[in-house]
Amino acid sequence: MDWKREWKSLAGMAAIFAGFYWLPVESLRLSGPLMESLALTRWYAREHVLLCLVPAFFIAGAISVFVRRDSVMKYLGPRANKALAYGVASVSGTVLAVCSCTVLPLFAGIYRMGAGLGPASAFLYSGPAINVLAMILTARVLGLSLGIARVVGAVGFSLLLGLIMHYIYRREEAERAAAQAALPEPEAPRPLGQTALFFGAMVAVLVFANWGAGSGDNGF
C-alpha cells in the first residue's frame, strides 16, 4: 500500500468535509436556492456523515478484520452455491439500519473480502430497502399491502440486478475466482463472542447515534 498517496487522499477528503462542516451559511448573502443548497450540504456533513457514514466505515473495516475470508467466500463467493449466495445477500440487509449512502462501505467491505459481484450487488440494492425500520414504517404509513410489496419488490429486483451484474462481468469474476483459489490458508479464527460483541457495538453506534427527540409531541 502506498501510504503517501493514501494519506494525501484522506487529507483531501478531510479538508473538504471540514470546509462544509464549518461553512458560515448564516453570514453569506446569497440567493434563496443557493443558500438552501449550502445549508443542506452543511447539514449533511454534520448529521449524516458523522452519524451514519463514519460508523458504516468502521463496520466495513471490521468486516475486513474480524470476518474470515473463507466464511465470506463460502456463502457469497463466486464459487458458492448460487441460490444460497443470492438468498443470503438479498435479505442480509434486514438487520442493518442503513441508507443508500451507508450501504456503500459495507458493499465494498464484503466485496473486498471475496464476495462475488452478483451477491454483493444484490446486497447493495436490497440493503437500504428492507431494513426492519423501513419495512415497519412503510407498512404503518402506507398500509400492509404496500409494505409487503416493498419487501418482495426489493428482494426480487436485487436478485435480478445481481444476476445481470454477474453476467456482464462473468469473465472478470472467473479470473477473480481463480486468483482467490490460490490464496493461502486463513489464520486461526477469533473467538465468536469477541466478533459478535464488536459487530453488536458497531451496529448499536449506527442505530443509537441517530436516536434523538422528534420535532413533534408524539412518538419517541
Image: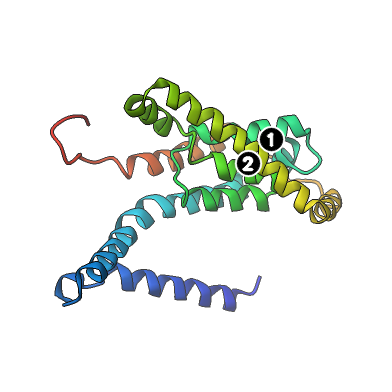
| Farthest top residue in view | 144
State the residue at coordinates (54%, 53%). Answer: 105
State the residue at coordinates (72%, 30%). Answer: 84
State the residue at coordinates (44%, 39%). Answer: 203
Q: Position of residue 158 (x, y in %)?
A: 61, 39
Q: CA distance from mark 2 to mark 1?
A: 7 Å
Comes first in the chain, label 2 or label 1: 1
Q: Position of residue 163 (x, y in %)?
A: 72, 42
**Pointer 2 and pointer 1: residues touching (CB < 8 Å)?**
yes
Instruction: List the residue tagged with mark 2.
Output: 122
Q: Is residue 10 visible?
A: yes
Return the residue nearer the eye: 99 or 180. Answer: 99
Q: Is residue 117 left or right of residue 63?
A: right
Q: Position of residue 73 (x, y in %)?
A: 74, 41
Instruction: Give, as a three-letter code, the residue at label 2.
Output: Ala
State the residue at coordinates (68%, 49%). Answer: 113
Q: Position of residue 22 (x, y in %)?
A: 26, 70
Q: Count the marks: how many? A: 2
Instruction: Give, as a three-letter code, the residue at label 1.
Output: Tyr
Q: Is residue 195 above or below residue 26?
A: above
Which circle marks residue 73 in the picture?
none
SS class of the residue under badge 1? helix
Instruction: List the residue tagged with mark 1.
Output: 86
